[in-house]
Amino acid sequence: MNSGPLILTCLIALSPPSTHAGIRAGAAEQEITPRAGLEIQHYFRKSIGVRDPLFARCLYLEDTTGNAVAIVGLDLIMASFETCDELRAEIREKCGVKNTLLNFSHTHASAALGPRGRSTVSNDEGSQWNDHTLDSIIAVVAKARKQAEPASLRAGRAKVQVGYNRRLTNTRNGQVFMGVNRMGPAVPWVNVLVADSLRTSKPLAVLFEHAAHPVIVPHTSKLTSADFPGAAGKRIREILGDDVITVFGQGCGGNINGFPLRSTHEKAEEAGRRLGEASLKAIQESRRITASLLTVKSTTVTLPSAPLPDRELLAEMMDLEKHNEDRMKQLRRIEHLLEEGKQPPGRRFDAHAVMLGREWCLTAMPHEMFCQYELWIDKHAPFRTTMTFAFTNGYEGYVAVDKALALGARGGYEAGRLPNWGGQVYSRHLGPPAVGAEKIVKRALSSLWPSETLPPK
């Protein structure tokens, strides 16, 4: 690519206004790559080295009234609510930051983060990495806040798609299976938020968001990697400079696979470069945000779990799976709940909104959300520009839309329930959310936004 004209155009577009907008911004990063020998998730395998490093990065924003938020991007696959709750509490105590969004890129060539002293990696070296990473995240937030300076903000969007919908339906039996569905819904854009220093007229940080599973790195590779999000951030810095902090946010990519799936590191880097190029275009075409006050709101609801199988089906499955201890363990849990007349626990769902007037809103939520939720937010949220995170502040599997959940056992890996042994059945919920979860999610999200609507976008 001939980057000369793009660099010139970007530099011209970066001149912030001379007036003080009232926003302060700071950014920082720290490497958190596990050493060789530790476990990569997922699929599980031991690392023998590093293809590209993993980072914790933070964009910190505050207004003149003291409202503030730390937006943290992590090149890790996931963390539980318990881990995120404890870490956010430490950040409040040690950094004085009340609102923190911990977003996980969900790269499948990385590691999961566990609670302090109780990591997801059993050996001592893994536990040391885990606790050191928790300390690094706290340090990154503290540094970003300490370095905050007067800044102006810009928001933009450009077309790009590094993955495809992964849900296909067998026309003979209606069963959903995983593949490349080029006609299925996807999020065909990248959103950016740029923080420009009023002191230097240069960007301090770029927050960029796209929705797709980082699964282009092959599952057979034993090299740790940030997959395509890492390569995208690298491309942005090649143009804007190494001192610009690039914070990636994973969107609602629960049913979107990066393409081509589990192929090569080179293909992941190619996809990341395309995402980086699109991000640069979004930066170039971005619009100034004039709002000077931050509003941060949150709410928590419970998503009920799907009903358990009846006793007849359970008996058939227990006979069929009697030699499979892992499956029998879950079936016995179902049997115990049926005997007590109880249903499996619901999923915690925390919704967050970071708003700058009616000009920009970052809506964030946990779990692996289907892309339809991000598309719905973009259509219905009463803001000029939206950005959406999933995989934020906790994780308990997939949250599909009601149409997929209504398929029952035919719902595929993300939404199916027994006798379909999808990933949801192995959770403590013993299946996916119940039909009706989509309405609960949308109600929770919209409760955070201003009630009055804007004209059509």
Image (cartoon, helix red, strand yellow):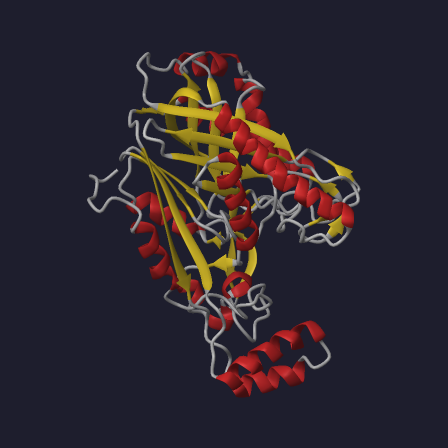
Taking 446 as reference, is 230 above or below it? above
Q: Residue at x 32, y 17 (%)?
A: 20
Q: Is residue 306 left or right of residue 106?
A: left
Task: Please give left or right for residue 73 compared with residue 108 in the image.
Answer: left
Q: In the figure, residue 99 lies in which quadrant? A: top left
Say which residue appears at 62% left-offset and 34% top-offset. 55
The answer to whether 31 is drawn above or below residue 166 in the figure is above
Q: Residue at x 57, y 83 (%)?
A: 314
Residue 272 in sight: no
Would you identify the image quadrant in which residue 12 lies?
A: top left
Quadrant (top left/top right/bottom left/bottom right) for the C terminus: top left
Q: Name the side, left or right, on which 326 lies relative to 11.
A: right
Q: Is residue 430 above or below residue 202?
A: below
> Residue 111: x and y, percent?
66, 46
Residue 366 position within the rendered picture, expressed as x and y whole percent measured from the top left: 47, 51
Q: Where's the N terminus, which quadrant?
A: top right
Which is more toward the observer, 457 or 183?
457
For residue 285, side relative to residue 321 (left or right): left
Residue 43 position within the rendered picture, expressed as x and y whole percent measured from the top left: 69, 53
Residue 235 at what x, y percent from top left?
Answer: 57, 25
How many discs appear?
Answer: 0
Q: Is residue 47 visible?
A: yes
Above or below, 206 against 391 in this view is above
